[in-house]
Image (spheres, rainbow, N blue to C red):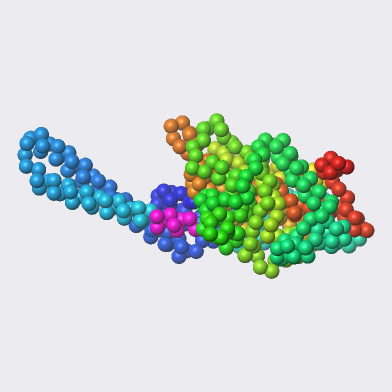
Amino acid sequence: MIDLKLLQKDFDVMSAKLMRKGVDSTLIKNLKTKSEELKAAKAAYETLQADQNAMSKEFGQLMREKKDVTELKAKVDVNKINITEALELQRVAQEALESIAMSIPNTPDDDVPDGADENDNIEIKKVLTPREFSFAPKEHWELAEQNGWIDFERGVKLATSRFSVSFGMGAKLERALINFMLNFNAKRGFEEVSVPALVNRTALEGTGQLPKFEDDLYKIDGQELFLIPTAEVPVTNLYQDEILSADALPKKMTAYTSCFRKEAGAAGRDTRGMIRQHQFHKVELVALSKPDESDKIFEEMVACASDLLTALELPHRLVTLCTGDLGFGAAKTIDLEVWLPGQATYREISSVSNTRDFQARRAKIRFKDGKENTLVHTLNGSSLAVGRTLVAIMENNQQEDGSITIPEVLKPYLGM
């Protein structure tokens, strides 16, 4: 959630930042109205409370002087009722403001480039040179079917479209990739954790998936439980509503989970193959840090994901997302896009974001900073999306006869 105190203190600056993120001006005006209503409700309550304190002091003085307090007592009793009503009005105003604020995205960092969509993202650098083929490279679904690694039709038979089944070396490679990624991340200081695949509404509100993106989530009928869209949700919320010691930070964690998304907003996109599935495997990086350390950890997480791709000998590039392509909770994001020769283009395989204190404010994750409790900064990133990594391995390592060579770093995980 955005800082509502900062919003009230400097509305023009905050609204300008939100407009860079594409927030509708009407919504911003509504936010201002609710903010002013809360400010007025607080002022009214504080005035009544000050009157109550003054009358209480006067009441004590009259009692000591043994004077008649009947009239003053009547005023005090009326004022108590007014205070109760004012406190309720303040509570209602606070809830109204927070209800709107829950649907407001994070403000972008000042150095995030302005832009409308992914076409305005800025390339930072390319890593490794794509291989030149002496033949026309196939796309991953052709290679998967030819080698018997992935069966898309049986996925549909078991569930519906955008589900698949892995067989033989395809299944083994997925498991090898998961273990390799977790071990790689552990060597970079990320502690492995295993978390539930189901979370409650509070957890999803904490990381910003709710209330805005409920249509993209799979909900358990009759329960306030949802299948996770990413391990970012349960791992970040491990410390929901807690106050950590300063010495405990930074907390750097990595987790493997299956992830589930309806992809309601992606109708017609990547309907074939493994790029956009309803269920997919992913290894995630999550960090909680002190505010002055989050930029450094952000760079560490980007480097970790990039070095992982390099170890797998997969050409990729790093891209800074513009304001129009930035996620709901992100203040800054760098995407890693892997080269897919079958499509002759780079496709996203990892997205590393610094959310600053946006998620921490929603999830109430703080640390003891001297005598004060301060919000942590939270960061998250894919390291990596397993299915897309398998796709990249198939397409980049294909041979003219359709066979696929295995990256050297994965051979020990396959007993090769």
The answer, for residue 107, to whether it is visible in the render is no
Q: Nearer the viewer, residue 107 or 102?
A: 102
Look at the image and say whether residue 155 sits in the magenta stretch. Answer: no
Residue 396 image position (x, y, % from top left): 84, 54
- Vertically, is 247 above or below 26? above
Q: Residue furthest front?
A: 222
Q: Residue at x 17, y 43 (%)?
A: 55
**Main secondary structure along the magenta-highlighted residues:** helix
Q: Residue at x 62, y 38 (%)?
A: 252
Residue 292 image position (x, y, % from top left): 55, 38
Q: Residue furthest bottom?
A: 268
Number of callouts in the render? 0
Which quarter of the figure has residue 215? Answer: bottom right
Residue 40 image position (x, y, % from top left): 31, 54
The answer, for residue 225, to whether it is visible in the render is yes
Q: Residue at x 21, y 42 (%)?
A: 53
Determine whether, in the image, residue 92 is placed left or right of residue 204.
left
Magenta highlight range: 95-103
Look at the image and say whether residue 99 sits in the magenta stretch. Answer: yes
Q: Residue at x 58, y 58 (%)?
A: 220
Determine whether, in the image, residue 28 is placed left or right of residue 292.
left
Determine whether, in the image, residue 93 is placed left or right of residue 204.
left
Determine whether, in the image, residue 396 is placed left or right of residue 158.
right
Q: Residue furthest left?
A: 67
Residue 147 image position (x, y, % from top left): 87, 57
Which quarter of the figure has residue 378? Answer: top right
Quarter holding the C terminus is top right
